Image: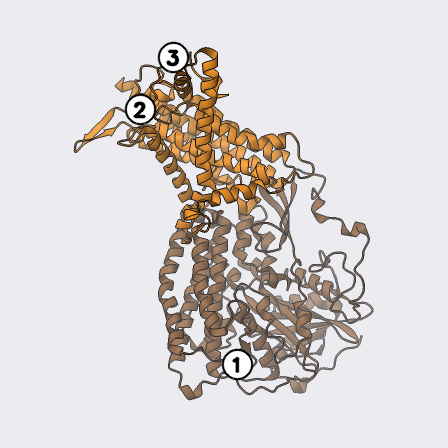
Chain colours: A brown, B orange
Amino acid sequence: MSLEESQPDTLETATTTAEDIEALLGDLVLDRDDHLNAPGFVVRPDEVQDTLFRLRDEAGYDHLSCVTAQEYEDRYESIYHLKKYDDPTDEVSVVVPTPTDDPVSQSAEPVYRTADWHEREAYDLVGIEYDDHPDLRRILLPETWQGHPLGRDYDQDRPQIVPLREHANPLQEDHASDAGDTMFLNIGPHHPATHGVLHLKTVLDGEQVVDVESDIGYLHRCEEQICQQGTYRYQIMPYPDRWDYISAGLLNEWAYARVAEDLADIEVPEYAQVIRTMGAELCRIAAHMLAVGTFALDVYGDFTAIFMYAVRDREKVQSILEELTGQRLMFNYFRLGGVVWDLPEPREDFFELIRDFLDDLPEALEEYHDMISANEILQVRTVDTGVLPPEVAKSYGATGPVARGSGIDYDLRRDDPYGYYDELDWNVAVEDGCDNYSRLLVRLREVEESAKIIEQCVDLLEDWPEDERTIQSNVPRTIRPDDDTEIYRAVEGAKGELGIYVRADGTEKPARFKIRSPCFSNLQTLPEMSNGEYIPDLIASLGSLDIVLGEVDR
Amino acid sequence: MDVLLQSGTATPTGTANATAANASAAGPVTTLPETISGALGLTGTLGDLVGGLIGAFLIANIMLGMTALAGPWAKRKITAAFTDRIAVNRIGPFGLLIIVADAVRLLSKELIVPDGVDRPAWDIAPIILPFSALLGFAVIPLGSGLQLADPETGIVFAFAAASIASVGLVMAGYASNNKYSLLGALRSIAQNLAYEIPLVITAASVIIFAGTFRTSEIVAAQTETLVTVAGIAIPGWYAFVNPFAFVLFVLANIAEIGRNPFDIPEAPTEIVAGYQTEYSSVYFVLFYLGEFIHIFLGGALIAVLFLGGPAGPVLPGFVWMVIKMWAFFLFTQWARSAVPRVRIDQLIEIGWKGMLVLSFANLVLTAVIVGVIA
């Protein structure tokens, strides 16, 4: 097979660790293919599991952050982006090239459970096949789809006409199997509590869940391809708002801003970083408010007070964000190298608005604790249900409040600092109950922590000297990163690690733009949490995962 | 059908103002059909028939009217008050005409009959639910002479009639050809089994006190003064005599009528809408009506058994009865806005392991106490 030449002279991150790994992997390494964020090791497609087992068990890379698949002119390539939960800056990429005429590679699923869905997506969109994969089917596109849309030879004019039997209605399936007393039940895609168009194929034994399988892709909007068709400078930034659209827009924008700024080596002025940090944390509060409100709704049942209270407080945040960005949902406020405009004038009024909100927040949170977390019925319903042990969570690549609710102390804002976070005084909320209740508590505590961050940002911004308020650095009109530079960068989104992999090809548009959605990985844990539980607990667990289908399906 | 339930032969006296509360405990009160036939000067079977029909028509309409107020309007307003909202306020004064708008809207919708439903069971189910609740009102003394019948087995009849609702729910769930409906129906059976027994057992403790099944006499037995505090006579309502039984009964009643936190047969976030998932238009309205009439019947039973029925100062008996029924309705809506739903297994556990034991303990204690005193 033909392999890419390694480029040792352009390395930035080749440290002793990289040599250690090379020594550890020994013969397995065919070549080096370093990325801007991590050393990359090229391995044979039939030695993927050996490599990953060794990296996981002997080097401690316990977090398969993302699997990127792409097609070059002469080969397919799967990239496994590995990290450590203890230190996410310690990254390594395993690059697995496969020939174009026989794109078969060994599956990583036995090593990292999360590879299951990631490889299915790679198969679905790019067309790489994985040996040993437990269930290699399409995941985002319909089963009947013809061709692999991100492959090079994909013909988008090809009619998607398939025989009638291929269109067999999956909802008509009545039983998972002929034997046994189980009942097959479709929960969703139109169901009050699936938080969007999620379809859960559930097998029930009475009221208890025997098996549940998520069927996703109803909201697939080709976000990756859209981004591959946009220019780095302006055309990509509006789209991240549409991934996690639960008002977490600025957090998503930051994911793109971070990866593009690191790729093109763009500095961001400190003043803009503070504004970004403040805006992002406002978004996090808004997102968590909705998460808590809908979770309570899932458990409480009827349209009750707590949901309205949460939405009421979220509206306040959105009003602040509207003052800042001009939008309530699709902000498009970040720019490469800064933000689009300064704080609204008069600044005092704007700060007043934020401070009013922050002053009222402790009281509001007290109300939430009164009504949700201190409520005995809610505790009976949520404590020790939907249990996700930390090892399982890690194997599935769970991040964000889901991981932190399982006692995994992992927060990119602290562990892989960006923006202004490392200058501020705040804590990472971790609960080790591993259940639905812990995830709820983590979100409520994170709202408190976000409020602390915002308060410090407001203090900083108030005292910022007027002549140093640079909102954007000088950024070239067109950005053309060097050919064949690759980078994977992640930020802490509302739902967890929101990462983006970009491969530049010397043009002003990315050659491959891969989104690592935290919801995608988190949703994979659902069967682990709900098998053997009752239907109401399945619903509660799903609510506690806080998925947004726009981000799951992209 | 209420005509058939009348006790004894009509003895019209024409005293339309005789209230149940003032009636002597010695014998049956003058029922509404008797009053009507007396006023019309009819006697015999014709009198029974005409009086019964007109009486039943009146009572049913009063209840349906209250339901109309409660369903599209009061429920929204109450929930909105709990959740910092305004709710309906656009059509008519205080948004009251939303009742008309909603009625027209719901009735003009398409009645969707899904494939494979088991007719006629599917069609009968929505009629059974409101019917069973209205049937229960036949023996409830609503005060101011508004009581359709006063049979010796009055309170037993009320419970029996209310329980028919379960049949309707099972029919709906089973006939709908929908798994969510089936789950809802199975849940409602499990729930009714678990809560009907404590409900009736707790009611039995009141019957031991009163020594009669006749609703008018249970009400009359509560008119005696319990204690006099600062010159105000506190009547011997069984809620005061035995508050423990009162609390048990209210709880079991909420479960029985399937309100929060025991609304799991419909549990919208879990099983979509339970047994009524496949119903639309008129059939849905009937279910909706039935649920609200059941709430009011539950309130009426509580009032009769524990709150002295229509008794109360100054205002006429009927007004007091309505106030008590609405108080219970308000309570259910409060619970709806504030109390999370329990899980099905927890609900069954509370029913069989908690309520049942407590209600039997209450019954035995009451029997002992009454036995010692008497």
Q: Chain of mark 1?
A: A
Find residue A82 and report its image quarter. Answer: bottom right
Q: Mark 3: which amino acid?
A: Thr
Q: Is residue B351 above or below residue A482?
A: above
For marks 3 and 2, the one nearer the N-term is 3
Residue A124 point in image, percent of width and height = 73, 62
> Depth-wise, is mark 2 or mark 1 nearer the camera?
2
Find residue A210 and report its image quarter. Answer: top right
**For the N terminus of chain A, which image quadrant?**
bottom right
Which sits in the foreground, B180 or A516? Answer: B180
Tag 2 residue? B21
Mark number, residue B11: 3
Q: Residues within 10 Å of mark 3 (few under 14, many from 20)?
A: some
**For the C terminus of chain A, which image quadrant?**
bottom right
Residue A364 point in image, percent of width and height = 38, 59
Q: Residues within 10 Å of mark 2 (few under 14, many from 20)?
A: many
Tag 1 residue? A338
Q: Chain of mark 3?
A: B
Q: Dot 2: what SS?
A: loop
